[in-house]
Amino acid sequence: MTFIARLAVLAFAALMIAPTQGRAASGKIAVVAAENFYGGVVQQIGGPQVEVTSVMSNPDQDPHLFETSPAVARQLAAAQIVVYNGADYDPWMPKLLAAASHPGRVVIVAADLVRKKAGDNPHIWYDPPTMPAVAKAVAQALSKADPDHAGEFQARLATFLASLKPLHEKIEAVRKKYGGGAVTASEPVFGYMASALGLTMRNEKFQLSIMNDTEPSASDVAAFERDLKEHKVRVMFYNRQASSKIVQHLVAMANAAKIPVVGVTETVPPDMTFQEWMQSEVTDTEKALAGPNS
């Protein structure tokens, strides 16, 4: 069965058994987020008035290998508000939404809010302007869906935006101290944050190959290895959720060369908020840049 045919089957099944679109069985606003970092922000703003389902939340799963299921189709068919990344990071979302369309459903695409498109680095939640834009769009959508609680949604939005201030201050402090430093990575997951920190990212062609699950060229591998051997980079970032043999090899080389290695992820770790997650990874980066005696 082709992918399009499978989508049609999933969508039909969802429509046959989905509850009334827009409200969960609890009477709360039903929200589906493709990724758990967006779902977590929706929960912070929506509070007790929302019931949020995050599709991708497994810290051990490679998000690029995710496949849809009837359960996901049912959740989307019942949702009043949907939030997803876009920029071709979760291409199954627009296809499923089109196959089971509902005129009253509000769809928030993070990439559209920050003017990113297919072909750009899709890991836009690491770009500091992204989540405030998503949070404001979520608050607006919730206020429209439940006007009686609009004041509460706006108050929680203000609290969320204020909670990002320590992160932004940390980013600025690291930028002032270590800006211009050269770093490298196995994938462009941390790319936007590295840029915000003022770091110079090397080996970007290699990173794109790994992200797109293609074989990096011999010259790109050799350049990466040379950077590690000759200490041309201060830190190596790698994706904890997608580590191929070549990436494991490079991580081992970095460790042998005593170049700090910082693991990053594409989903929020369990029991952490988005703010705590970002703060933790920026703090880990700061420690790595400071060197082994920090």
Image: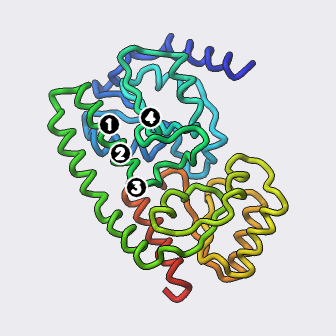
Q: Residue at x 64, y 33 (%)?
A: 67
Q: Residue at x 60, y 77 (%)?
A: 234
Question: Which of the marked residues, 3 or 2, is nearer the chain's N terminus?
Answer: 2
Kindly state the secondary structure of the residue where label 2 is placed. helix
Do residues under tags 3 and 2 come within 8 Å of each other at their CB atoms? no
Separation of disc 4 and disc 2 at Cα?
14 Å
Question: Could you classify mark 3 by the number of other residues whose Cα lies within 10 Å: few (under 14), some (14-19), or many (20 or more)?
Answer: some
Kindly identify which residue carries mark 2.
41
Question: Could you classify mark 2 by the number of other residues whose Cα lies within 10 Å: few (under 14), some (14-19), or many (20 or more)?
Answer: many
Question: Is 83 on the left or on the right of 246, as rendered?
Answer: left
Kindly state the secondary structure of the residue where label 4 is placed. strand
Residue 66, label in figure: none
Do residues under tags 1 and 2 come within 8 Å of each other at their CB atoms? yes
89 is higher (above) or lower (below) than 223: above
Q: Nearer the viewer, mark 4 or mark 2?
A: 4
Question: Could you classify mark 1 by the number of other residues whose Cα lies within 10 Å: few (under 14), some (14-19), or many (20 or more)?
Answer: many
